[in-house]
Structure formats: structure tokens, C-alpha cells
Image (spheres, grey):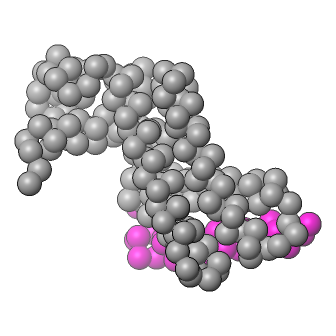
Amino acid sequence: MVTPTRNRRAEILQAAASLFAARGFHGVTLEDIGGAVGVSGPAIYRHFSGKEALLSELLLDVSSRLRDSAAAVVTGSAPAAEMLDSLLNVQITFATDQPALITVHDRELGNVPEPQRRQIRRLQRLYVEEWVTVLAELHPGTPAARLRAATHAVFGLLNSTPHSAGELPERAMRPLLHAMARAALAASVNDH
């Protein structure tokens, strides 16, 4: 059973992500976050040491979840093409289901304290390398630097989804994103 404290903590994180995405880290106060979940600003300190700790946890958590999901895909026994489809689905799900986190992830890393920022960057690099492993299996002989660049380009394509949210229903957006990402990856490795 989820405890009320754990529910409140999750509510605070979700509210913080939405507010940080809408107004930026510096445009949000603990009072704003508390107000969004029905508590006072100082009540946030029962769960987090401050606004930077909130931001750090948001970005560490999402980076860890993405990396863990990718590692689970790559350690499986599926053919590389299926692994790539699964990796694309991981990133597409992140992009379509968590648009506020995408925005915060993209814009606010510089506001995370250095030790946590290093952890987040490490997790991000590990996530990228899971993709590179699969792409290298699909495209032997393609330089790893090119595969890495292609991976980052696909992330850019997929992570721009929040900017067009609502224009297409998700049932249409997901396959469109998948096809576009596959095409971008194919184009990036077939011309080396």
C-alpha cells in the first residue's frame, strides 16, 4: 500500500515538474509548489530539503528510469531490430506521457547542484550507449561517434513532441514518431 507521505511526495514532484516546465526553475517558489498540492510552501521541507533537491530528484529519477528501461531491452535476447523498436518505444512513451518532464529535462539541468548533475549526465551517457550498442549491431562498421550523434538527433526529434502536443491524437502521434525516428536513424547510418 502507498503511504500518504509517499503520495504527497509524488504529488509534489508532479506539481514541481509542471510548474518548472511552465515557468522555469527560477520562476517557481516553494509556495507555488505547495499551493499546487494544497499545502504551505514550508510544508515542502517535510519531503525535500529545498527546490534544488526537488529538481535533482526529478531529473535523477527520469534519467535512471530511462537508463534502466534501455538496459532491460538490451540485455534481452530479442534480435537487434526488435531491440531498436523497444528503445524507440521507451523514448516515445517518455516524450508523449511526460511532456513536462521532457521540458524540465531539456532546460533545467544547469540548475541542479554539480554532484547530482554529474550523476544525471552519467545516467544519460549510459542510456545513449545502450542505443549505440543496438545500432552498432544493426549497422556494423558505422563509427560509434556517428551512431551516438544519430541517437542524440533522434532524441531531439522525439523530445520535441511537447511542442506539438494536442495537434494529433496520441494513437496517431506514436506511430508517426516511430516511423520518423526509424527513417532518421536509417538516413544517418546509410550515408557513411
Residue at 33% over, 40% down = 18
The range drawn in magenta is 166-192
* Residue 163 position within the rendered picture, expressed as x and y whole percent measured from the top left: 51, 51
Which residue is nearer to you in this view: 172 or 91? 91
Query: Is 177 inside the magenta-drawn segment?
Result: yes
- Give the quarter of the image for residue 16: top left
Residue at 39% over, 53% down = 98
* Residue 147 position within the rendered picture, expressed as x and y whole percent measured from the top left: 77, 60
What secondary structure is the magenta-colored segment mainly?
helix
Q: In this view, does 183 lie above or below 45?
A: below
- Give the quarter of the image for residue 137: bottom right
Q: Which residue reaches farthest top?
A: 42
Image quarter in which the N terminus is found = bottom left
Left or right: 165, with 119 as reference point: left
* Residue 79 position within the rendered picture, expressed as x and y whole percent measured from the top left: 62, 83
Q: Which residue reaches farthest right?
A: 192
Query: Is 60 inside the magenta-drawn segment?
Result: no
Left or right: 132, with 142 as reference point: left
Image quarter in which the C terminus is found = bottom right
Left or right: 120, with 135 as reference point: left
Q: Can residue 28 be seen in this view?
A: yes
* Residue 165 position within the rendered picture, expressed as x and y whole percent measured from the top left: 44, 58
Left or right: 137, with 121 as reference point: right
Q: Is residue 124 above or below residue 136?
A: above
Q: Is residue 46 above or below residue 66?
A: above
